[in-house]
Image: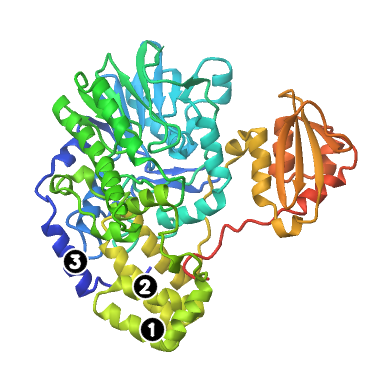
Amino acid sequence: MSQNRATEATRGSLADAVAAMPMADERDFADAARGFVARSAVRQITAADGRVVWDLDAYGFMDGEAPETVNPSLWRQGRLLIEDGLFEVVPGIYQLRGFDLSVMSVIEGDSGVVVVDPLISKETAAAAFALYTEHRGARPVAAVIYSHSHIDHFGGVKGIVSADDVASGRTQIIAPDGFMEHAVSENVFAGTAMARRAGYMYGAALAKGPYGQIGSGLGQTVSTGEATLIPPTISITRTGQTLTTAGVRFVFQVTPGTEAPAEMNFYLPDHRALCTAENTSHTLHNVLTLRGAQVRDARAWADYLTETISLWGEELDVVFASHHWPTWGRPDAVEFLSTQRDLYSYIHDQTLRLLNVGCVGAEIAETLRMPPALEATWSARGYYGTVSHNVKAIYQRYMGWYDGNPAHLWGHPPVAAARRYVAAMGGPDAAVDTARRAFDQGDYRWAVEVLDHVLFTDEDHTRARTLQADAFEQLGFGAENGTWRNAFLSGAHELRHGQFGTPSTAASPDIMAALTVQQVFAGVGIRIDGPRAWDEHIVLSWVVTDEGTTHVTEVRNGALNQRVADGPAPGSTTFTLTRPALIALVAEGRDIATALADGTVSVEGDPADLGRLVDLLGPVDPDFAVVTP
């Protein structure tokens, strides 16, 4: 990482930003410390192989005033997020904060505890729960709640309970309807590309420090231990559904299509406490994340929060969530919920208003202004999402990629366009001179756009690489948003040091093992190299014994289609196997000869037909280029 200073232009922009911020309002610091019980004496959390997967002291440098290389607002948010330890929300409800990107909550009952959202990795979840038991005593885990289908809310489950605990009925796993479909598909279907981009979003390769990674706004970063998954045993299907476990009463609100495709809030009437999952947090969240995902429904998000307030706003005493610190007292809690609701409602409606007078997403993102009351509220600031990229996401949801201008309907792809732009500017050296002038004037946005064209024309152009890294760095230093900072600085890192690839993957063994038969074949279809498969016609039948179903897959016209059938297709090669054997064979690439030899798979017909299918699969690349062609 470079040790460049912030330029005069960057320092000036940060000074202007601070002048508009409510820096005197420090109530969040009192709330983040409220209920503190203890910190863990074990400051580094390691995997079985000794690898450090989480360091509780990694952000110890974040003390005092913000350095010139960090936006003071983001620095403030980071200082709040490094408050790690065990905290009492109200008697009987505890939180473990600072152990991962997310927060784990523990609700005490008369015959055990309910653990809510057990972090990303089993190692961090185990370490957090160990701190809880050290100070509250060992208690059986009656239930685990997954509030929604993102991995930072279920991946550490095996650090809390085992599959045997669940199979025996000792522990329930509670999740919203549709959880498994979305939890698995998000991490597998587009998992390679998402994981590569997540490395940028969370600054996975950046050194932690004032010149590098200081957090992501939602949490500091993601842990790198083993992600696990135990399927739910109880699905929450409707708002108003109630459940009592370990003597604790829950009332649920389903909120599909908000921050996650499958998500739910719940209310604890005996504690007068509301858990809002990730539908509220002390930041503007993402309508579309920088790592990539399905665009979320900002209108539904706002409407569900209105419903939340209607359901419990008159009786709650505290709101807590799966990130950040709680909000206490009914007036403050309802105001917090209302402000979060207003954020998504305002951005949604104003984007629609402006697109209906002909503005495109990029124009709306530059012109839309937030109400002063929201600008002055810390929990509404864009540490994780931004108004800019959320507006573009809402535009995308309604209007798609095409902005209606025919000049943009059939543009050249990046390399071809870059060559033409650079030629029009007089060649690479002249284009770099243009970017240099923009950099010196503090116009880093124009500098990186010009230099992007140069690098997509000649990725080894030394002056362009150096200046592009420097310009990315200044944009990172100035960013209030944690993920923007990480993305800019990650781009600078790769230009200076080479590609860092994908430091972690969400497609863990447990997630792969949870694939349905349909998802297995859908994943295969995604990898079919269409042009190579144009002239192939391959029909295979699959008798899945542990599910009592037969599936037929057919490659035709370069596409793989699947269907459930009453029996094998006439004349097709038929494989008889269990779902785990199918996953091993098709999704994980187990050798068919070995599977036939050990009896886990039997076949009628020619087993080489499977090899014909496998030969059509294209590779995936977890190290694909981002800032170069």
Q: Say which element carries label 3.
A: helix
Q: In which quarter of the image is residue 447?
A: bottom left
**C-alpha distance separating marks 2 and 3:** 18 Å
Q: What residue type is labelled 2?
A: Val
Q: Quadrant of residue 321?
A: top left
Residue 231 position within the rendered picture, expressed as x and y whole percent measured from the top left: 55, 27
Tell me the number on the disc at residue 448: 2
Looking at the image, residue 387 lies above or below residue 408: above
The residue positioned 40% from the left and 78% from the top of the image is: 466
Looking at the image, residue 563 lies above or below residue 239: below
**C-alpha distance separating marks 3 and 1:** 24 Å
Q: Name the residue under label 3.
A: 13
Residue 137 position within the rendered picture, expressed as x and y whole percent measured from the top left: 36, 20
Residue 248 position within the rendered picture, expressed as x and y whole percent measured from the top left: 35, 13
Q: Nearer the viewer, residue 549 or 331?
A: 549
Q: Name the residue under label 1.
A: 432
Looking at the image, residue 160 lies above or below residue 477: above
- N-terminal label among 2 and 3: 3
**C-alpha distance separating marks 2 and 1:** 10 Å
Is residue 70 left or right of 535 when viewed as pictured?
left
- How would you rate the neighbour count of disc 3 (Cα within 10 Å): few for under 14, some for 14-19, many for 20 or more? some
Looking at the image, residue 440 lies above or below residue 229: below
Q: Nearer the viewer, residue 13 or 403?
A: 403
- N-terminal label among 3 and 1: 3
Res. 208 in view = no
Q: Which amino acid does label 3 sit on?
A: Ser
